[in-house]
Image (cartoon, coloured by chain):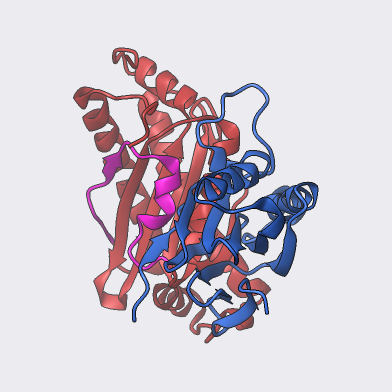
Chain colours: A red, B blue
Amino acid sequence: MDGNAPEFNAIQISCLSEMANIGVGHAATAIAQMTNKPFQMSVPTVRSVELEAIPLMVGAVEELTVGIYMPVDGDVPGHMAFLFPWRSAQAFWRLLLGQAPESPEQIGELEASVMLEVGNIMNSSFLNAISEMCGLPIQATPPLLAVEMAAAILQAIVLEATTTDSHALSIETKVSCEEEQAEGYFLFIPTLGGLKRLFSSLGLPEVA
Amino acid sequence: MVATQLLVGMAEIQVAKEGPLFVCLGLGSCIGLAAYDPVAKVAGMVHVMLPAAFADKPVDKPGKFADTGVPHLLEQMARLGASRSRILVAMAGGAQVFNFGTGSAGKLDIGRRNADAVEAQVQALGLRCLGKDVGGNQGRTMTFDSGSGLVKVRTVTSMERALCSLKGS
């Protein structure tokens, strides 16, 4: 664990878990409406982590993965991403387009924009839910898409996070649709300043 | 014989007497730099994240930045008996991974800046670079077998291929 990582107390962590839980619930509803399939979300894990450790947190670090990344603006800025293994991405494409590319080289403009839209809807639903709960303006910025090794995608995001503000908290959850064997991994890394504003808007004690 | 594997995570520096297999997994815009002194048989690798240390913040991990990471790698290797004048290096990474979406071009071009910054360090320190695989859109896993000297690179779509050997010839 990073020596200078700020410690959050149990109340703050559990409050954040609860907010994230509601946020991912909204995101699951949005994706279910988009695809007409039932989606489940696991209870989000909120972890105080060293940023550099994030790329190796996902199981199959070298597996071909589709990642949608959105920088987050507003009072709780940060970095948000939605990642799915290639096989799951193909399931999403089949659900939404009727067919899926067989390899990354076959991803055209249509396939790319569908994926960007999936990420957009998931992330925006999550952010809107959080924004409403704490009464702070939070906006997602246009999404970026990568089709790459999971670790390479997460590294690129961590790198962006490093250039903004030091913070050490990640919210992860799994989104899955059993029927279609599609699952994704959702990650939100708020900035330290953003977290402080979030906690104070909820009347929670300052970070010690 | 199976070599010990040394995973070099983001912002990390690893050095050892020859033997272990150094690995940088899934380099996106980061750079992996492998270094070897064939006489002292001292090897090392650094996983650089950013071109230069922030002016307004203390450096928490020297391996994070090109301008601190490369000199620190050499320093740690020197402690094991390596001499800068003999050190051979190879580098990989510096890709732009997010290549779809509005504004992706140019916005996240940190990969190219990382590659330039590491290369500038290599030149400034007078190191001989025997292999380079940087830029493009593909993430890379870089391995350096300090037993055989072989540096290899693989991507999600291509088989592992040899980049160069740091054993000299």
* Image quadrant where residue B29 sits: bottom right
Asked if B137 appears above or below A102 in the picture, the reply is above
Q: Kindly identify the residue that appears in the image at 34 percent across and 78 percent down.
A: B2
User: Which of the image's four quarters has the N terminus of chain A?
Assistant: top left
Is A192 in the magenta?
A: no
Horizontally, is B91 left or right of A18 in the view? right
Horizontally, is A130 left or right of A14 in the view? right
Residue A192 shows in this picture: yes
Who is closer to the viewer here, A20 or A162?
Answer: A162
Is A49 in the magenta?
A: yes
Who is closer to the viewer here, B159 or B162?
Answer: B162
The total of numbered circles placed on residues is 0
Asked if B135 appears above or below A55 in the picture, the reply is below
**Location of residue A89 in the rendering, given as x and y in whole percent from the top left corner:** 45, 72
Horizontally, is B91 left or right of B143 in the view? right
User: Which of the image's four quarters has the C terminus of chain A?
Assistant: top left
Q: Kindly identify the residue that appears in the image at 65 percent across and 34 percent down.
A: B53
Residue A33 shows in this picture: no
Q: Kindly identify the residue that appears in the image at 66 percent across and 45 percent down.
A: B66
**Location of residue B169 in the rendering, given as x and y in whole percent from the top left corner:** 68, 80
What range of the chain is rendered magenta? A40-61
Who is closer to the viewer here, B103 or B92?
Answer: B92
**Location of residue B52 in the rendering, given as x and y in whole percent from the top left corner:** 68, 38
**Location of residue A202 in the rendering, given as x and y in whole percent from the top left corner:** 32, 18
